[in-house]
Amino acid sequence: MKVHNHVLLWNNATIKVLDVRYSEMVLGERMLPHRLPASAFLFAMNGSAKITLDGVVQLATGFHVLHGGKGMSLDIIAEGRFEYYLIFYRAKLPQSSSKKLIELMKHDNPFQLQYGFSPHSPLSLFEMTNLMDKEWQQESTLEKFHVKVLFYRLVHEIHRQLYDQGIETTKPDFVSQAVHYIHERYNEPITLESIAEALNYNMQYLSRQFKRQTGRSPIAYLLEIRIEKAQELLLHTNATVQEIADYVGYTDPLYFSRLFKKHTGVTPGNFKKHMPGKKKVSVRPYSEFKLSIVDQNSMLYSNDGIDNHYHYEDEGDLLMHKRTKTPMVATLFLCFSLLLSACTGGSSQTNRDEQAPTTQAVAETQSTKVVTTIFGDVEIPTKPERIVAVQYLSSLLALGITPIGSTERTMESPYFEEMTTGIDVIGSSAEDISFEKITDLEPDVIILMTSDEEVYKKYNKIAPTVSIPYGSLENAQKEINFFGELLGLENEAKTWIEDYEERITAAKAKVEQVIPNDATFTILEHTDKALSLYGDNYGRGGLPIYQGLGRKIPAKYEEEIVKEGGYLSLSIEVLADYAGDYIILTSDKTLEEYKADPVWGTLDAVKNNKVYIWPNKRSYFIDPLSLLAQTEELAEWLSGQK
């Protein structure tokens, strides 16, 4: 155990005792699984019980001590008369804590550790716990203060015996906790924020780690679990669609039906009609990936699911959020790049081995051409007239094409919203699509961003679909050039790219005239819940500042942010360590509010008015049209013209 680190954090943290509870149980009685609302000590003082804490079973006989962190699941089955105390507490570091302490808390948080042991000297623990319970029942603030004093003594004695016995503590697997949480509350209006809050973890970090272990975001996981539960109810009950929708958490049965069809390919009614008595097809990632994060034999959790606030979680909208610069990009692009062959009488006469990996190798018929994609050959019109752009709307608008359909999220960019008149809405985002609406529009081509073949097939059933996976197009120029070749608009693409590069060069020169070359820039996003730092391959100003205008990341954290993939979650206490000469800040607050803040107001950039504050709606998008406008917008501010 890291005794020194744990004691250091206990000694510096602000501790508040939240509750002291005494409970009795009789033989066979069970306290059903529930999540700890805060960190807690359980002190068993008499009898025996089987205690399960986050899937770890311990047999408590006589005196026994357990500790668990906020969000852990506790289950108790009495194996006789059983008496115990539960002491809930909250611990956090003061805002003035050093960076070292904050890093220790992040990587070795003693208040979230799980451990249990039978103390060698239980009577002293019993006396302190018993006295805490009596004092807690009193109304006087003096008695409440005494409880806090006793709590520190109790913690000291527990840790002394813990370390003397060499008991190992265990860090919780918070992804496993998130999975359990989802299964327990599948029919509640859960969001990513509520999961993170319940488990006491940073929202962005939880999302990244969850996706790393399971292959999808928490909310995408919730959605699939919820749909599977609906399948089960449709097959094995006589409940109506309205009742099932309500049971799994949807108040709107039409919305539920649309989601159900999107994920299964059929409506709820047809699913039940065509699969009577058949075993449902599992879409549950929990079983599909055979994760080790959950005990498959655990009796604590049911196999149920949920959906909410998932619109921006999966790769459907990711191009609007992040650009990748990994070697995989070139591979994907070469793999996907259009390999066009002659299309005569429905068959190609060109040897595929002789085709170059570029859209310039094309032999067209009078009306169609064949596009080779990662999902195989697709025959599309040479000059499509009715295009549905699930993604990549900006590139089509830049080339003078107005698609017949796109998503609300894609059309939200303020930089080209005046160009979207007449475009029908096909869904709120790529994860909330109305396939019925797309069918009604009768497109001749659908433009999509996915590497998921099952998703692709759903669109391709409606119309020929060209999917360009996320990360295949590295920058605005390549994206415009790609669609110029795809749609036979090479000249338009060339003209746009030349104009783009001229305007970026002009913006950069404008800034260089007034801003020193060694000036550093920090890209931040600040909300009530989080403070985030962005690198040069994200939105929020990272791409226009670092790539478009060629400005510098502060050297003191450049290596760190590259190592973390271009994104960091920060604590407000370490903000000063990451602040550059200039700050590009996504926030809903004003500069005056930040100047009045005790932490922000100490930053040189804030004091010297070198902070550019813009809302999420202006900073989020990094499509070609938005990126160009953002670069010029920031250049005007930096050069003093705005």
Image (cartoon, rainbow, N blue to C red):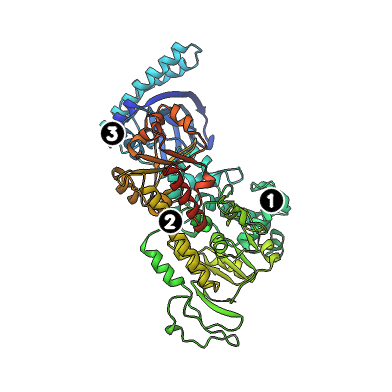
Q: Examine the image and state in which quarter residue 355 appears.
A: bottom left
Q: Is residue 383 left or right of residue 353?
A: right
Q: Which quadrant of the figure contains the N terminus?
A: top left
The mark found on residue 5 in the picture is: 3
Q: Viewer-proximal residue, 598 or 450?
A: 598
Q: Is residue 132 left or right of residue 616?
A: left
The location of residue 450, given as percent across then percent down, is: 52, 63
How far apart are the two marked residues, 3 and 1, measured between alpha carbons?
Answer: 50 Å
The location of residue 323, given as percent across then percent down, is: 43, 57
At 46% across and 19% down in the image, what residue appears?
133
How far apart are the two marked residues, 2 and 1, measured between alpha carbons?
Answer: 54 Å
Which residue corresponds to mark 2? 504
Would you say residue 209 is visible in this rendering? Answer: no
Q: Sequence-wise, which precedes: disc 3 or disc 2? A: 3
Q: Which residue type carries mark 2?
A: Ile
Q: Which residue type carries mark 3?
A: Asn
**Label 1 SS:** helix
Crowding at dot 1, Cα within 10 Å, few <14 / some 14-19 / many 20+, comes out as many
At 59% across and 49% down in the image, what residue appears?
307
Q: Sequence-wise, which precedes: disc 2 or disc 1? A: 1
Q: Sequence-wise, which precedes: disc 3 or disc 1? A: 3
